[in-house]
Image (cartoon, rainbow, N blue to C red):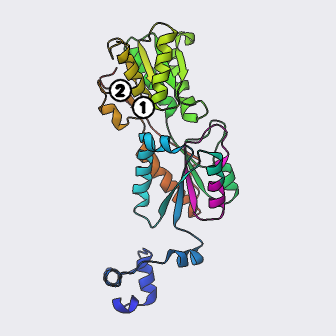
Amino acid sequence: MARRAGVGRGTASRVVNGSPHVSESARAAVLRAVDELGYVPNRAARSLVTRRTDTVALVVSEDGDRLFGDPYFAAAVRGIGERLGSTPVQLLLMMAGRPRERARVLDYLTDRHADGALLLSLHADDDLPDVLEARGVPTVCAGRPAQRRPACVVDAANHEGGRAAVAHLVERGRRAVAVITGPQDMSSGVDRLAGAREAWSAAGLDPADLRVVEGDYSERSGEAAMRGLLAAGPPPDGVFAASDLMATGALRVLRGAGLRVPLDVSLVGFDDAPVCRHTDPELSTVRQPVEEMGAVMADLLLARIAGQVVAAETVLPTTLVVRGSS
């Protein structure tokens, strides 16, 4: 390739590796030679020298139904993929929702088949980030397990989002509000509920009057939670569901019970997923910048792999988006 371009081997190497210390004429000649010869770098050979695989793992601690059914994951993968698309780094998807899958992930990553790991949907006291870090695998987590503090976390302002959602319902004059929470073994579920309770108390309302039922962020759990609320007593006049999928399930049950949204019940979700624009009425929600979170996670992991020191926690803002359901 260097002979075809009429340059030295060192110059050809610098062009292929993206070095800026090459003249534009030499770069053009080398890239032309790359096209003419169909040159593709041998990653296996490069890894022997660099001790890098140019691969990062995206580890999702959920089953396939959640991964492919929840728009949160699609948005996160899109943000990660777009950011890595401008680099030589490849993305490897791994599932860790079951014990056998988790063990396989640990073995694979410990054997240095990837340079680092992006971790999504951590539950309870999951020590996966700690174990990987102890084995020399840099990690970046989307959110954190409710009981742990991983080395590097990217999150949305879940507490502020929950507070904004319930404050909005109170401003709409709703005084019989229910919250369908996310899983309480995840920091996002805990923080959104804490924000909701804070807004309720800040309005001078009795904390005991805020009805709370737990969901798991799925549409089915939103349906079940809403049925339970209607069966347990008078219907609420406001509902904050801690995900848009749960809000969609709740909306279906409310309409089936003959309750009008927003005339009888104001409804607010969380995420600002595409489904919000396809419900009738369109769903009010709290937007979290999931694609941006994915991009930031990718940037931080690349920095950690390069040996740079990064912030332990990065929190991106959430925004209330008011539509027809409230």
Q: Residue at x 49, y 27 (%)?
A: 221
Mark 1 is on which residue type?
Answer: Leu
C-alpha gap between disc 2 and disc 1: 12 Å
Q: Which amino acid, mark 2?
A: Ser
The answer to which of 315 and 245 lies nearer the viewer is: 245
Residue positioned most to the top: 234
Q: Position of residue 228 (x, y in %)?
A: 51, 16
Front residue of this view, candidates 256 and 60: 256
For disc 1, the neighbor class at 10 Å (few under 14, some 14 to 19, many from 20) is many
The earlier-in-sequence mark between 2 and 1 is 1
Return the x and y of residue 114 as percentages of the image width and height. 57, 63
Residue on which the image places disc 1: 245
Kindly indicate the quadrant of the structure image that contains residue 165.
Answer: top left
Whether 309 is drawn above or below 322: the answer is below
Quick one: SS at disc 2?
Answer: loop
On-image quarter of the C terminus: top left
Q: Residue at x 59, y 57 (%)?
A: 309
Q: Is residue 134 in sight in this rendering? A: yes
Magenta highlight range = 104-128
As drawn, 8 above or below 170: below
